[in-house]
Image (cartoon, helix red, strand yellow):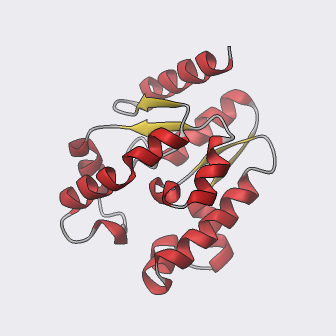
Amino acid sequence: MVGLPGVGKTTLAHALAQRWGCGVFDTDLLVAASVAMPSAQYLRQFGETHFRERELDALRTALVGDAVVATGAGIVTTAPARELITRECALWLDTDDRTLTDRVAAGDDRPLLGEDRAEGVRRLRREREAWYRESSRARVDATGTLDEVLDRILAATKELTS
């Protein structure tokens, strides 16, 4: 799941896990726990290559059992992560650039966006969109309330598993 402040990936993941009676993991939280610092701080201090290595380790950990796994939006930038993701029932949670920009403007530490968050959102979307399509089984509109987005996710997963 791609992260979305407001109707966040972690909130959605927990709601799905509760509905399905399974575990839940957030790769950003797993990275932070493994490096004993916030993910954004680790990314800034050690660089994107090292961060993506820790993120891949976190993804491998999260995929061991039955669980809902929330990932950061950049996880698709490495081939090994995409390979793992494509084996799963992965959904691309997407919304328009303006909504994404509004959601990340709330003060979250997002080192890869740069100073101009709107331009950062547009740039990262252009760079990653093909990987999102390649890695996910369905695109889900993540605009709206928690219940609206959750209903769309449940409908998409039902269609994929029917």
Extreme-bottom residue of the structure? 45
Task: Relative to 22, say whether 24 is above or below.
Answer: below
- Image location of residue 115, percent across then percent down: 21, 71
- Image location of residue 152, percent across then percent down: 48, 22
Extreme-right residue of the structure? 65
Quarter occupied by the C terminus = top right
Q: Is residue 161 left or right of residue 106?
A: right
**Would you identify the image quadrant in which residue 154 lies?**
top right
- Image location of residue 17, percent across then percent down: 67, 36
Q: Is residue 33 left or right of residue 37?
A: right
**Would you identify the image quadrant in which residue 109 lies?**
bottom left
Name the residue: 39% across, 34% down.
Answer: 142
Name the residue: 21% across, 44% down.
Answer: 98
- Image location of residue 120, percent across then percent down: 25, 61
Task: Relative to 144, say whether 64 is above or below.
Answer: below
Name the residue: 46% across, 86% down.
Answer: 45
Q: Is residue 105 visible?
A: no
